[in-house]
Amino acid sequence: MSSDILTVEEVAEYLKLAKKTVYKMAVEGTIPAFRVGKFWRFKKTEIEEWIKNNRKAKAE
């Protein structure tokens, strides 16, 4: 079953980053994330939009 909600591990793999980096970005608010109890979760559509928006910002 494919889910629109990703874990830290899945985001790290998707973005080719270390889990520690993803945690840091989530805490700092530089990547769209939300907490469920003590766990960070990410909406895949928001991550994809964040990638698209950051790509545009770099091109300008």
Image (spheres, helix red, strand yellow):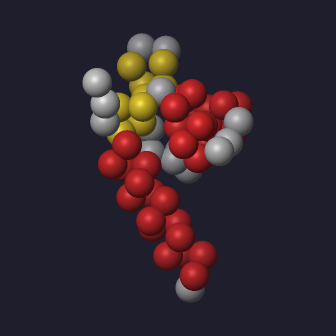
Up-down relation of residue 49 to residue 26 (above or below): below
Nearest the camera: 21 or 12? 12
Image quadrant containing the N terminus: top left
- Outermost residue toward the top in this view: 37
Residue 47 image position (x, y, % from top left):
43, 49
- Who's the residue at 37% across and 49% down the image? 46
**Residue 42 is drawn in which quadrant?**
top left
Nearest the camera: 51 or 34? 51
Residue 28, visible in the rendered structure? no
- Who's the residue at 45% across and 67% down the image? 53
Left or right for 7, reference 19: left
Left or right for 50, reference 26: left
Residue 34 image position (x, y, % from top left):
41, 32
- Outermost residue toward the bottom in this view: 60
**Residue 5 is drawn in which quadrant?**
top left
Image quadrant containing the C terminus: bottom right
- Who's the residue at 52% across and 66% down the image? 54
Nearest the camera: 37 or 21? 21
Up-down relation of residue 47 to residue 2 (above or below): below
**Residue 41 is drawn in which quadrant?**
top left
